[in-house]
Amino acid sequence: ERKAETAASIRLRKGGEPIVCLTAYDAPTAKALDSHCDLLLVGDSLGMVVHGMDSTVGVTLEMMILHGQAVMRGADKALVVVDLPFGSYEISKEQAFDSARRVVAETGCGAVKVESGIYAADSIAFMAERGIPVMAHVGLRPQAQLVTGGFKAKGKTDSERDMIIAEARAADEAGAFAMVIEGTDEALSAEISKMVSCPTIGIGASASCDGQILVTPDMMGMFAWTPKFVRRYADMAGVIDEAAAAYARDVRARTFPGEKETYRLKKS
Ligand code: KIV
Ligand code: NA
């Protein structure tokens, strides 16, 4: 039987068997995913895929803590990592530590993740040295989309590639225990994965990474549209549509509830 994963055990898997990661936002889904995954990320993608927001910039620390608590109740073996949302860590390393401390203390999760431009390296080191394992996130950074102009793959120009490599190196040297690489081509992902000492977890970043992650509702087929890099493993939207249609039909025909679903209490 596999022992519970920690940031330290994930870090040791550089170059080994691929690290299996998915996002989770609630207890029952976390419970269903737990035995299959090494790491469950409570991503700030929940703003979009759970709460229907247009982007992740409106997600709050309180939302992350509430969903983090739910996932922790469902997870057993996988390492649970909770995203620090936009605005909760960028101002200073002290702000980052305080937000991360709240997340760890109030959810019991094993690590936090920050989208990591160069600016984040000081905060990653500050948190890691003080007892909070940090996962970095380079390449396409959704929290920066108002500046970068949306959800587009990164690394088309030499200067962009150099910047992403510098961000990855800075996060690695700052002590990140792992890093997500999002939306980069194979050559760039491979170069970063070779260069950094921590495991890389790819999303739209090729098979050259040390592990993979997808947004669970995307890979479960909850949405009509997904990015190119998503593989659909189920048709959850279809399953829900069929079940809802069948239920509506039964209610309207008064065939639900039936005999089996009806209480007939004996008076006492
Ligand atoms: O918020 C999220 O789900 C993420 C993953 C896509 C890495 O950051
Ligand atoms: Na995220």
Image (cartoon, grey):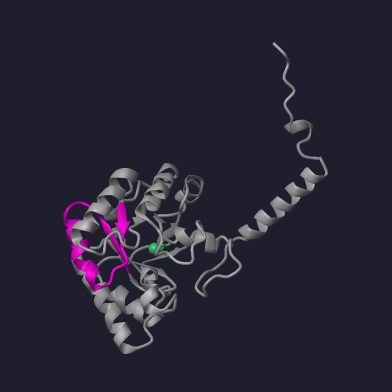
Residue at the far top: name it. 268
Along the viewing direction, whichever of 116 and 58 lies nearer the viewer: 58
Which residue is pictured at 39% across the width and 49% down the height?
68
Tell me if residue 122 is in the magenta stretch.
Answer: yes
Tell me: 10 left or right of 184: left
Q: Residue at x 77, y 39 (%)?
A: 256
Q: Which quadrant does ligand 1 occupy?
A: bottom left
Picture quadrant of residue 158: bottom left
Please name whichever residue, 157 or 10, is drawn nearer the observer in this view of the structure.
Answer: 157
The answer to which image quadrant residue 42 occupies is bottom left
- Residue 187 at x, y = what percent? 37, 82
> Which stretch is magenta?
111-137
Q: Position of residue 246 (x, y in %)?
A: 75, 50
Res 18 seen here: no
Q: Can residue 236 be spotted in the picture?
A: yes
| Residue 172 higher or lower than 263, as above or below | below
The picture quadrant where one finds residue 133 is bottom left
The answer to whether residue 213 is above or below residue 73 is below
Tally of numbered discs: 0
Q: Is residue 239 left or right of residue 19?
A: right
Assign the N terminus to one quadrant of the image: top left
Above or below — where is 1 with respect to 40? above
> Which residue: 81% across, 40% down?
255
Judging depth in this view, the residue of 127 and 92 nearest the camera is: 92
In reply to whether residue 231 is colored magenta, the answer given is no
Write the residue at 23% across / 64% down.
91
User: How far across and how far down the image is residue 213, in percent?
Assistant: 43, 64
* Residue 99: percent from left, percent from top: 27, 53
